[in-house]
Amino acid sequence: MPFTLPIWRRSICAVAGAMAGSLAGMVMGLLQSEMPPGVMSVAEAWEASFALAVAGWVVILIVLGLWLHYGVSQIAGPALVNALLTATFTVFVCRALHIAFLDTILGLLIGTLIGYLLCLLCGRFSALKGVRL
């Protein structure tokens, strides 16, 4: 039985955030396992978060847009916002905690939470408000 959180069945944005967050967390964990605490400056953290956001965005576009047929043009904008917020929060939380072996799980949880919150926010301003799909 594959590991899934119940929220992933209800919110595709949470799935996208989980993908971007776990990617960012995994890379941060690999980086932090080789460097002592406090080595990464704030400027380097911003650069890393931007690079990881772009990588996460590309992964989301490939997996959700192409493989799962949601359409790249339909999800490109929301996926970019999701990846930017998720990667930024993940990098800075992982940098602050500096627990390399938990960074992937932290990224997964942060991404799921951010994706779900963005999904709720988008639902409030959607033209389909009140319509259950």
Image (cartoon, grey):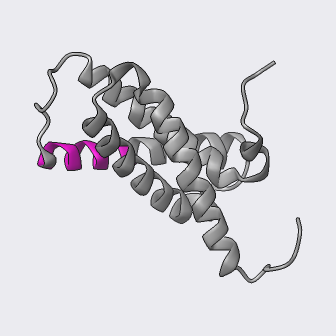
The answer to whether one can see residue 73 in this image is no
Q: Which residues are magenta?
A: 43-53
| Residue under the point 50% across and 29% down | 105
| Magenta segment main secondary structure | helix
* Towards the viewer: 44 or 72: 44
Q: Residue 7: where, in percent of width, then height?
A: 73, 46
Up-down relation of residue 79 to residue 67 (above or below):
below
Q: Quadrant of residue 1?
A: top right
Q: Residue 115: where, in percent of width, then height?
A: 58, 54
Task: Specify whether 111 is left or right of 67.
Answer: left
Up-down relation of residue 62 to residue 10 (above or below):
above
View extreme (right): residue: 132
Q: Residue 55: where, in percent of width, then height?
A: 40, 41
* Towards the viewer: 72 or 53: 53
| Residue under the point 33% across and 25% down | 99
Magenta stretch encompasses residue 39: no
| Residue under the point 38% across and 43% down | 90
View extreme (front): residue: 97
Task: Specify whether 129 is left or right of 99.
Answer: right
Task: Specify whether 94 is left or right of 19.
Answer: left
Task: Specify whether 34 is left or right of 25.
Answer: left
Up-down relation of residue 96 to residue 123 (above or below):
above
